[in-house]
Image (cartoon, rainbow, N blue to C red):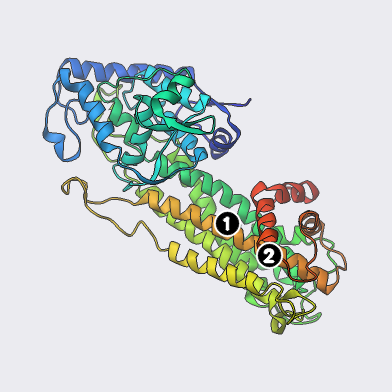
Amino acid sequence: MGKVVIDGNSLKIEDVVNVCRNNYQVELSANAMDNVVKSREVVEQYVNNEKVVYGITTGFGKFSDVVISKDEAKTLQRNLIISHSCGVGEPLDEEIVRGVMLLRANALAKGYSGIRLETLNILIEMVNKGVHPVIPEKGSLGSSGDLAPLSHIVLVMLGEGEAFYNGARMSGKKAMELANIPTIELTSKEGLALINGTQVMTAIGALTVYDAMNLSKMSDIIAGLTVEALCGIVTAFDENVHRVRPHQGQINTARNLLRVLQDSNMTTEQGEIRVQDAYVLRCLPQIHGASKDAIEYVKEKVEIEINSATDNPLIFRHEDKVISGGNFHGQPMALSFDFLGIALAELANVSERRLERLVNPALSELPAFLVEKGGLNSGFMIVQYSAASLVSENKVLSHPASVDSIPSSANQEDHVSMGTIAARKARNILDNARKVLSMEILAACQAIDLRGNKGLGKGTLVAYELVRKEVSKLEDDRVMYIDINKCESLLKSNIIIEKVEESIGELN
């Protein structure tokens, strides 16, 4: 089994995916352990001296002016967790919960939070032994971080709440007992250190941006099949066109298309049968490329966030300072995940328009709705309806969450990010976009068969054959959702990307 060593500074999105989906074990670096221990010493010093510091010897939010005695420290931390466990809705997927725990552990490993090493080790042990707290998906404002959902993790550490263990939902206490992990009693600063941060929104967003990177590659492969099905003009993908407008995503998309279409006998050159194609074919590099650039921007922001200290207050032991700031505020992630959702929605938008060109005989010169005995058969007619429904839903979901705010904690916390809503929306948009692209690849393969396969490109041939292993050509009407679901499973597995890249090299 693989392993990811965390130090608070060097975690990558690929590491997050390995822990979340491939059950890699998590280990603290020696340097991180040292930093955590020394940071905790500062907290103990402040508590012993009864110095007034927010979150250590005071209440929280509006109650920041209420001083808490040393004797009440444990009660304060427990009350914080049980009172803040206000999440509602369906549980987050277990892979997301693993990501949340990993990211919170990595933030604590930086040594600015003042948690005890034994408390941090229990959190890591939960990841490694598969104790996954039930975290309701709704209830976070994204400032002060993801307070409500993160509290549900800590409940299980206290022997409260609920968790999934070995596929079964049970009490947190029972899950910890079965996994042979001790429960804990929190002390000064620890509850706040565990729940004051952006790890829920960032875990959702990290997995979404990783999947978006793959879906972007898949979009180029699928678009290549549609280009062939419609005898598209590849001249528009010439590198000279994109060199003079050098957006990297645009350049990469054009290069991807030329590579997947290499040696194709189904494409045309400018002026061969028409002068130019419609925008959804001709402008593929510009449209897909813009989404690629947006996804890359979000990836960069996520990789900063997953290696950041996001709680409050922060302990700077070398300067002997404890500073109350606002690193828990989710605005950098909220804007990023709204952008990600819009970028993914556009991949679906243009895919549905290509699908429309495939099924519309006035645009494709193919049999109406891609079936030879039309009238008796409806063929792909309602496939396009379903795709249209999904892209319209995405337009609603693409409304930015980050433009909204609502005051909380008696107006002490008077601007919040809604970043967790933005992340969840982006994930929903991704799911819809993948479904639309599944419909397009199904239709493109059907269109190629109807036009007559004269020889596909080096990359598109690989994709076509993988689809045809799962789904045969449509001769007469059949239950279509089964075919769509098979194509979606192919896309979700990333097997098409892997096999295409084996054939033509890595895509961008």
Quarter holding the N terminus?
top right
| Residue in the picture at 47% in, 67% down | 395
Does dot 1 land on a helix, a strand or a loop? helix
Residue 109 in the image: above or below residue 442: above
The percent position of residue 335, horizontal first and vertical second, equals 40, 54
Residue at 78 percent across and 81 percent down: it is 271
Residue located beneath label 2 in the image: 480
Q: Amino acid at mark 1?
A: Lys
Compared to 502, does 447 lie above or below? below
Q: Mark 2: which amino acid? A: Met
Answer whether residue 66 is visible to the viewer in this image: yes
**Is 361 placed left or right of 325 in the picture?**
right
* Distance of label 2 from label 1 (alpha carbons): 31 Å
The residue tagged 1 is 292
State the image quarter where residue 266 is shown: bottom right
* Residue 187, position as x, y percentages in the image: 26, 20
